[in-house]
Image (cartoon, grey):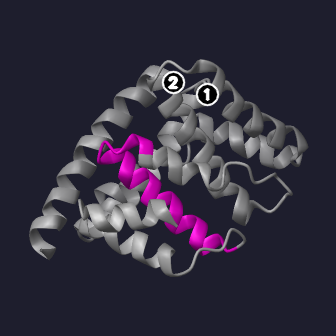
Amino acid sequence: MKVFQKIIEKNESVFSGELAKSLNEKFDLEDHEDLSILIRLAYTQYVLDEKEIASQLSSLISDIKFTGNHDIWTWVKSALVLRSYIYNEKGQSELSKNCIEKINFALSKDKPINQKAFQRVLNGSLLNYDKIENAKDENAEYGWRLVQLQKLILIHEMGGGDEFSVERAEKEIQENIERLKTLINEFNQTLR
């Protein structure tokens, strides 16, 4: 796919290049591992200020309908909230709203127990502070921070929870992005 090739050719990040090469060789919309790699790549591109590429990557799966398969939907939801966040940054609130409506529609079709779990997510109960703090190395820290970024953007775009405000999510998003940029720069220096 052109977007994967563009990332490989740009060679901005060793980490992004490896993910893009993997997907360029094989990308299956029904393989949750491929979707996981796609989302890591999209969020990494966002961190690198490649927001258009991040949006293009997210658009590859954002039209997948919710069928109850959370192995797939987890990644689609991450794609939708990233696109929503980027749209909001550009002042395109209608496009952002469309992304959030898809998530809300899926929530309305899901089991009540999963809806309650989603509310816990919006309250920040599943954030990874301890895993980030106790990461065994910078690679592990990077992975946990990227997961954290996905959860924070989800909280932000879904309007926060009773115990976790949109403002707090935004503050933590920016702090997380700064640390991720530092980690990417360190990886690039080490691996090149």
Residue type (three-letter) at the residue carrying disc 2: Asn
Residue range of the region highlighted in magenta in the rendering: 31-52
Task: List the single residue furthest toward the bottom.
Answer: 25
Residue 51: say if magenta: yes
Task: List the single residue furthest toward the front.
Answer: 2
Give the side of residue 71 with respect to residue 8, left or right. right
Q: Does 138 appear above or below 82?
A: below
Q: CA distance from mark 1 to mark 2?
A: 6 Å
Prevailing secondary structure class for the magenta stretch in the rendered image = helix
Give the side of residue 162 with respect to residue 187, left or right. right
Determine the residue positioned at 60% across, 65% down: 35
Q: Does 144 appear above or below 23?
A: above
Give the side of residue 75 with respect to residue 68, left or right. left
The residue pinned by badge 1 equals 96
Residue type (three-letter) at the residue carrying disc 1: Ser
Horizontal and vertical percent for residue 177? 30, 42
Residue in the foreground of this view, choosing between 92 and 183: 92
- Find numbered disc 2 in the image and state the secondary structure of the residue it sits on: helix
Determine the residue positioned at 25% across, 69% down: 14
Residue 34: say if magenta: yes
The residue pinned by badge 2 equals 88
Determine the residue positioned at 48% across, 63% down: 2
- Find numbered disc 1 in the image and state the secondary structure of the residue it sits on: helix
